[in-house]
Image: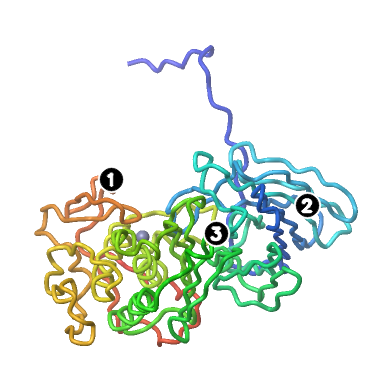
Amino acid sequence: MHNIAPPFHLPHPLPDPPGIPEPVDQPYCGVLHLAVDATDVDRGIFRVRETIPVTGAGELVLLYPKWLPGFHAPQAPIELFAGLCVHAGGRDLRWRRHPVTVNAFAIDVPDGVDAIEAEFQFLSPTDPAQGRVLCTPDMLCLPWNTSVLYPAGHYARGIMVDASLTIPPGWQAAGALAVLDHADGTIRFERTALDTLVDSPVLAGRHVRREALDDQVSLTIVADEPHLLGATPEQIDAHRAVVEQADRLFRSRPFDRFEMLLALSETLTGVGIEHHRSFEAVSIPGYFRDWGDNAARRDTVPHEYVHSWNGKHRRGADSWTPCFEKPIRNSLMWVYEGQTQYWTHILSARSGLARSPLPPRATMFAPAAAGVPPSTRPAIPSSPPALLFPGRAGSAARIITPKGRSSGSMSTRGCANCPGTPARWTISPASSLPPRRGTGRPTPMNSTRWSTR
Ligand SMILES: [Zn+2]
């Protein structure tokens, strides 16, 4: 056999361009100042001004968040990022987009400056065909990842941010971030780490109703029209019962406070996105008004609430990443979403919020589905979550696919899409959760992660 050199006239690849600096677990050199002006709600434009400290001259790479927890994929809308201008010391600075990583921007920082200033806009889609609609003339949702650049080379938890948000006059806002003050439409938030900031969206609007479900959990409702806020006491109580039943189920809380952010709109894109201390849920305008007709739409609240325990406080070890540039792996997605949807059925039925069709394994909770008052129902047994949709080894087991919207099956020997996925899982028992009044910060994954064996 002869070694034959490839013909020289065929194409050959160029070397890869230099990569993005790897993140290290060290604090960034200073605090980012992030100001988002979201008053242009008619056009859906968020205007951002950001000050980023630097330690000296040289190349600085800024990243637009790409891999987002809750989406499990690189779904950050870089196509809606616009108008980047960078200044320092009164001069405009040129920026260069990375030739491959299109959400990375390199800036040559000159001598003699201790910070650079970036200005840009986020353009909310105005039609669902363009992406997730985040803004209408009456409400907006601000996921902070849409409106921040961060320096490459650091863990997100090591980058501290002083953030502020300006909303239209007369609007109210809610979210999990602690507020320093609110004056002239501008809300200043307490200094927080970038990972917490991105995990703490803000919901704001012209027509707002706020209900305390208990001393730690609040429900904020924003609607297209004031009359859509007219929830009855019984309807609010059903949401309160979700919180009560989750306490009975999990027996502790992995957060210091929790904000249920519920938007009722025919314009915002319908969605449910989980966060550690809040969730975003966009539902139909008649969520309360047409209560008798939309029971099937009401499992979003318990589903996203359960994710605070299952998916945020605990998550698959390979789904945690140090910054938003690192790919999220989803080998335990079937637990992340499947187990959550299982408990969603349980909490929906026991709270009376919705009468979900219970999976076969949940027939022990039939009294709840039959409408037996919560006070007379048996306590939920704390059976190991590993019993979720079990099947015999090698047989098909039920699994809820991402976002819990459809079902499929997978072998208990492993997922066809994830060769090598083991059949046995170890999941931390509920008693290992921190005390009820947690810090609100995610527990280090090393101590709480799911592991395989
Ligand atoms: Zn989910």
- Which circle, 1 or 2, is nearer the viewer? 1
Residue 165, compared with residue 434, is above or below; it is above
Dividing the image into four equal quarters, which quarter contains ligand 1? bottom left
Whole-percent x, y for residue 452 in the image:
27, 64
Q: Is mark 3 within 8 Å of ligand 1?
A: no
Left/right of residue 128 with respect to residue 329 in the rendered view = right
Foreground residue, 124 or 264?
264
Q: In which quarter of the view is residue 166 placed?
A: bottom right
Amino acid found under the numbered disc labelled 1 = Asn
Q: Quadrant of the N terminus?
A: top left
- In the picture of the structure, the residue carrying the numbered disc 2 is 58
Q: Which mark is residue 417?
A: 1
**Residue 154, percent across and down?**
61, 61
Query: Pointer 3 and pointer 2: residues touching (CB < 8 Å)?
Result: no
Q: Amino acid at mark 3?
A: Cys
Q: Nearer the viewer, mark 3 or mark 2?
A: 3
Q: Is residue 173 among the parts visible in the rendering?
A: yes
Quarter occupied by the C terminus: bottom left
Report x, y in % for residue 275: 46, 66
The residue drawn where x is 50% and y is 43% is: 128
**Outermost front residue:** 227
| N-terminal label among 3 and 1 | 3
